[in-house]
Amino acid sequence: MILNARESAEERELKNLAPCAAKSREARRVRPEEPCPFRTAFQRDRDRIIHSKAFRRLAYKTQVFSHPAGDHYRTRLTHTLEVSQIARTLANALGLNEDLTEAVALGHDLGHTPFGHTGERVLARLHPQGFTHQAQSLRVVDFLEKDGAGLNLTVEVRDGILKHSKGRGPIFAASGDGPATLEGQIVRISDIIAYLAHDLGDAFRAGLLAPDDVPPGLRQTFGARGSTRIAAMVGDLLANSQRSENGGLALAFSPALEKSMIDLREFLHGQVYQHPRLAEGLAAGDRLIEDLYNLFLNDQKLFREFFPATQPSGGGSPETAVCDFIAGMTDRYAQALHQRLFPVENRPG
């Protein structure tokens, strides 16, 4: 009997992946559905994410530098693709499930706001229940895509999306706080590797920093280019992660490299993310989002003209609905809508 393509792929996973790797055959969904005859469950999730509207909008959302700063700066989409590439490289080298890793990586920032983390901070301040992009990413795939039906992703992918964010805390999440799968943990680490490598490169391109501004110890550890920075971190993780006798895997960097990563992150926060040349644009994005939030919250009739109530299973408070709308905006749509609703002569202040 010839197995169908999905069953053949599942058999290859059982044969070739590490014992600790997630297996597609064991994947679970909140709403059970018939399996695809030619794609595993995680491949199906990956495809659903790629074909979603939220994924397409990432092309016009800020990573650090807002458009029209230039054509070669990272956007939220290119960052996502870089995270996916790094994560797949690590998953392959460690014998983990590349399809699960890729799906989590491609979906991890679907809920990010326009104007990068400044947009996230504004909504967190305005919304009574708070706001985080990782929780919003899960809300996107669970409720907001497909006119309220959601994508019905596997539990494993949903877990990795929700728990990918690390903020300025430790590189490795405390036990019980991080993703349940090693593949999800790989995406969390790859997210850090990607932004440490590319945000520094974009800062050089923008003229915010010169290579010689980076402390000598960090230059020696990470090299002069994005590729050498990525290679240093990927190579160190592969060299220091340890397999146990029972088939488990403990991910680890060397203490020296982990400290250098934390030092580089703090350097970026102090010298790039808070740079005066970025402050004006960030402040403008802050005011724009607050204007839209207050307008739509106080004029629900106007709000429904732009954002009909099409999320019955994921609905909630008016504040949540307004956050859903604003978080889904691209930078350029938010700017155009603000100009339309707040003509210069009528803008607050």
Image (spheres, rainbow, N blue to C red):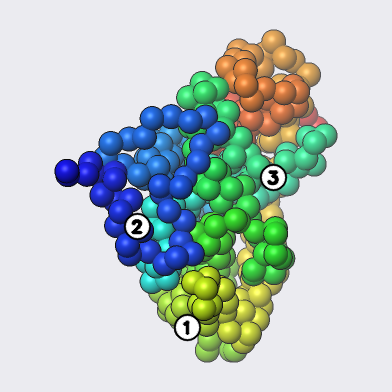
Along the horizontal axis of the image, is 137 left or right of 74?
right
| Residue 80 visible in the snapshot | no
Can you say which quadrant of the picture contains the C terminus? top right
- Circle on res. 13: 2
Mark 1–mark 2 distance (CA, rounded to whole Å) = 24 Å
- Single out the mark in the foreground, 1 or 3: 1
**Res 267 → quadrant:** bottom right
User: Would you call the spot at circle 2 few (<14 residues within 10 Å), some (14-19), or many (20 or more)?
Assistant: many
Mark 2–mark 3 distance (CA, rounded to whole Å) = 34 Å
Residue type of the residue flagged with mark 1 = Ala
User: Would you call the spot at circle 3 few (<14 residues within 10 Å), some (14-19), or many (20 or more)?
Assistant: some
Q: Which residue is identified by label 1? A: 239
Comparing 325 with 173, the one in front is: 173
Residue type of the residue flagged with mark 2 = Glu
Can you say which quadrant of the picture contains the N terminus? top left
Chain-order first, disc 2 or disc 3:
2
Mark 1–mark 3 distance (CA, rounded to whole Å) = 33 Å
Along the horizontal axis of the image, is 156 left or right of 8?
right
Comparing 157 with 225, the one in front is: 157
- Circle on res. 132: 3
Label 2 SS? helix
Decide: is 234 above or below 290. below
